Amino acid sequence: AQSVTQLDSHVSVSEGTPVLLRCNYSSSYSPSLFWYVQHPNKGLQLLLKYTSAATLVKGINGFEAEFKKSETSFHLTKPSAHMSDAAEYFCVVSEGFGSARQLTFGSGTQLTVLP
Amino acid sequence: NAGVTQTPKFQVLKTGQSMTLQCAQDMNHEYMSWYRQDPGMGLRLIHYSVGAGITDQGEVPNGYNVSRSTTEDFPLRLLSAAPSQTSVYFCASSYSMFSASGNTIYFGEGSWLTVV
């Protein structure tokens, strides 16, 4: 069975400083991993995805994540936070094939960006 | 190309009432699903469909029905609303379930439902 743990429910950074949102996963197979962002009262937007190609994945808005199989981690980073990055972020794991393929969501990390 | 469209955006129901949340996508996606989002719990899968005429239960299906008569539409029905169904509901779609390559899943903007 797959599971996702987002290690911080809230992260607060100052504008212009680095962002680190942590995600650990467990999976029986080679998973696909995603980060989604949700702005207030909006749907979920895909930031980036890992699908067994390069372990360092670059996404939109300057975000990137590194897949580390030995650590079962998929942490999201950004070198310099912007006010518009304030949102909730979800780490998602997907495994299985065909009709058995399912997504499992982490519980979310709320990112606050201070001026 | 509108993507995934959900209606209504906000709804207040009385306990015992029934209602349908509508979901439509215009991307010719095979896979559609419904999730509910509750504080501190991420998104949990209610029902999903891998094509017209095919539906299956997810993690939390009780109290909900779905049908998939067309590729485009995937309505979610609350049969007899309960306060425990107060939540934010998201419809999602992707091109295919039958791929291990991590097809991108597209989400609607959500439906805020309150049951009083």
Image (cartoon, rainbow, N blue to C red):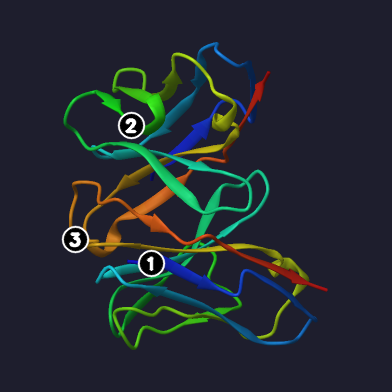
Q: Are marks 2 and 1 in contact (CB under 8 Å)?
A: no
Q: Which mark is residue B2?
A: 1
Chain of residue at mark 3: B
Task: Report the front residue among B84 and A60.
Answer: A60
Q: Could you tell whether A4 is left or right of B71 in the image?
A: right
* Residue type for callout 3: Phe
* Residue type for callout 2: Gly
How many C-alpha atoms fall within 10 Å of the one at disc 3: few (<14), some, or many (≥20)?
some
Looking at the figure, which quarter contains the N terminus of chain B? Answer: bottom left
Q: Are marks 3 and 1 in contact (CB under 8 Å)?
A: no
Residue name at image x 34 percent, y 54 percent: B105
Residue identifier under label 3? B98
Q: Could you tell whether B68 is left or right of A3 in the image?
A: left
Query: How far is disc 3 from disc 1 in space, using C-alphas?
Result: 24 Å
Instruction: Point out residue A21 in the picture as x, y percentages from the top left corner.
Output: 51, 24
Residue identifier under label 2? A59
Q: Could you tell whether B45 is left or right of B79 in the image?
A: left
